[in-house]
Image (cartoon, coloured by chain):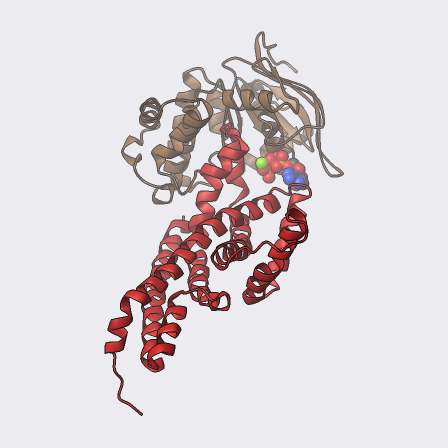
Chain colours: A red, B brown
């Protein structure tokens, strides 16, 4: 067994950095898109909008019962077939790995965020709605300025925890042959045979990012505890 | 009943009924409130006092009868509801301040979003009313950092910032520690002296004697008695009111 040689890592840094950038970008996009969509899914259920509420509930239940990797496969193989059948006389329309990854992660995260927000919505007391009503704020203004800011504040630690999981899950894009941090490392390792060094480096990067994010979760928890302590 | 007949009613309820499921919470309640009048509503727990004033700004929806506020008839029409709510301020037992906003933001949000005021104008107005309730120095704090009495005074200022024509109070001092009741009542007395039209659910009989033009006694969803405070407190007509007063005084 050879001694560890981390100089190979230094040589691979630019490539690894590219991979990490993709992981971070995918996380950021899925976070924003998932949160927006998830908020919508939670709101139609909270407001009991006819039809939409049932659809949202079914969608969330469905997504949450399927492993992410299945959703990725499903999107990658099935959607081109369906799209082709609908728009291209039955000839498959490839969606492409990158688009698949962004869409799938956004749609997948939306289901998880929506459950967090749905529970958060229930934590806001009825008095807040009554005060907003009495002040003649519209339903839209009430949710935008009064209810949702409180919901995001209360749920921010859980949302961030979910986002850490999301960041780790982005490594699953290897099944689409995309080059995220793990993908970059494994490609380099295949070329130079330095599997251990490469994967130790990747593990260290995940460790640093996720533990710092967890610290932030702890800070947020403390802050929301103070804020709700009225 | 020897109540004065109001000439120019700001609020007029005619045979209003309200059910919660099978429970008949308001039974044919009629009431006229003239501009500048102060009405105190009292009665045992569950008698429909909150329900009555909450129907006036449609926090609760009445089933039948007519409610007119400032010339607007309360129907399902959202425009009428919004118009009425702009003219009717409400103060709750549990304050219901927005905990994520500063005191100043609590006071400016509705004038800005609902009345369309600019930021500077809304803030100037907020400081005016915060000064009136004697807490301008707390404007930058959050509700959680204030005492109960201070929070309730902010809630009064917040409602006043909409410059309403009528103020509704639902047991504004019931959730307060005894030593804070007075500071809130003093604020309300001042408001009454300035000529605000007020409907107030309260068991603070001293306050009622001091400001009320009329006292309304409710029981089991019905308006049982309506009288000037002197007459009501010294010589209540119905046995239920007598019984109630004995309990409140002792
Ligand atoms: N949302 C509701 N659903 C069902 N019943 C209700 C609801 N709100 C009030 N009630 C019932 O209606 C009746 C009148 O309630 P209301 O709150 O108006 O009484 P109140 O006179 O204000 O009493 P309190 O002095 O306890 O505040 C009570 O019996 C109450 O249980
Ligand atoms: Mg009540």
Q: Position of residue B229 (x, y in %)?
A: 54, 21
Residue placed most toward the observer, A115 or A169: A169
Side of B32 relative to A123 (left or right) = right
Q: Position of residue B133 (x, y in %)?
A: 35, 28
Ligand 2 lies in which image quarter?
top right
Residue placed most toward the observer, A78 or A57: A78
Residue A11 figure quarter: bottom left
Residue placed most toward the observer, A227 or A86: A86
Which residue shows up at 47% across the image and 38% down it?
A144
Q: Position of residue A97 (x, y in %)?
A: 50, 59
Residue B69 figure quarter: top right
Q: How many marks?
A: 0
Which residue shows up at 36% across the image and 23% down it?
B118
Residue furthest to the right: B22
User: From where the camera sits, is residue A143 visible?
Assistant: yes
Residue furthest to the bottom: A1
User: From where the camera sits, is residue B185 visible?
Assistant: no
Q: Quadrant of the N terminus of chain A?
A: bottom left
Residue furthest to the top: B7
Q: Position of residue B109 (x, y in %)?
A: 41, 31
């Amino acid at each position: 067994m050879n001694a560890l040689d981390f100089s190979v890592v230094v040589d691979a840094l630019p490539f690894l950095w590219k991979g990490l950038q993709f992981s971070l970008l995918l996380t950021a996009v899925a976070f924003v898109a998932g949160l927006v969509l998830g908020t919508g899914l939670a709101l139609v259920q909270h407001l009991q909008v006819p039809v939409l509420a049932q659809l949202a509930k079914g969608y969330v239940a469905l997504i949450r019962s399927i492993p992410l990797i299945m959703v990725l496969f499903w999107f990658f193989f099935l959607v081109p077939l369906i799209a082709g059948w609908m728009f291209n006389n039955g000839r498959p329309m490839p969606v492409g790995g990158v688009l698949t990854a962004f869409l799938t992660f956004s749609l997948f995260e939306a289901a998880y965020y929506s459950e967090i927000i749905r529970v958060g919505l229930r934590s806001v007391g009825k008095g807040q709605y009554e005060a907003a009503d009495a002040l003649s704020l519209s339903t839209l203004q009430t949710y935008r300025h009064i209810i949702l800011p409180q919901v995001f504040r209360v749920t921010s630690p859980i949302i961030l925890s979910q986002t850490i999981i999301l960041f780790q899950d982005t490594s699953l894009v290897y099944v689409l042959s995309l080059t995220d941090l793990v993908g970059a490392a494994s490609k380099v390792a295949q070329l130079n045979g330095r599997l251990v060094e490469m994967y130790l480096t990747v593990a260290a990067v995940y460790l640093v990012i996720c533990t710092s994010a967890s610290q932030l979760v702890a800070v947020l928890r403390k802050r929301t505890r103070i804020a709700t302590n009225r | 009943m020897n109540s004065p007949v109001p000439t120019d009613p700001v609020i007029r309820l005619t045979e209003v009924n309200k059910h919660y499921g099978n429970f008949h919470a308001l039974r044919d309640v009629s009431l006229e409130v003239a501009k500048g009048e102060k009405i105190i509503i009292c009665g045992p727990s569950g008698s429909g006092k909150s329900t009555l004033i909450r129907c006036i700004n449609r926090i609760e929806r009445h089933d039948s009868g007519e409610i007119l506020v400032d010339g607007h008839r309360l129907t399902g029409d959202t425009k009428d509801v919004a118009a009425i709510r702009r003219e009717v301020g409400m103060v709750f037992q549990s304050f219901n301040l927005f905990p994520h906003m500063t005191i100043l933001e609590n006071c400016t949000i509705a004038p800005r979003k609902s009345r369309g005021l600019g930021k500077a104008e809304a803030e100037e107005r907020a400081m005016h009313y915060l000064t009136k309730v004697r807490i301008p120095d707390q404007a930058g704090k959050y509700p959680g950092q204030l005492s109960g009495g201070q929070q309730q005074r902010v809630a009064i200022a917040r409602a006043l910032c909409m410059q309403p024509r009528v103020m509704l109070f639902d047991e504004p001092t019931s959730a307060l520690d005894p030593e804070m009741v007075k500071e809130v009542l003093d604020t309300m007395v001042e408001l009454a002296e300035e000529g605000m039209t007020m409907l107030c659910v309260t068991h603070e009989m001293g306050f009622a004697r001091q400001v009320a033009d009329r006292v309304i006694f409710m029981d089991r969803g019905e308006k049982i008695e309506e009288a000037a405070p002197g007459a009501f407190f010294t010589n209540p007509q119905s046995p239920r009111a007598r019984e109630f007063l004995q309990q409140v005084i002792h």
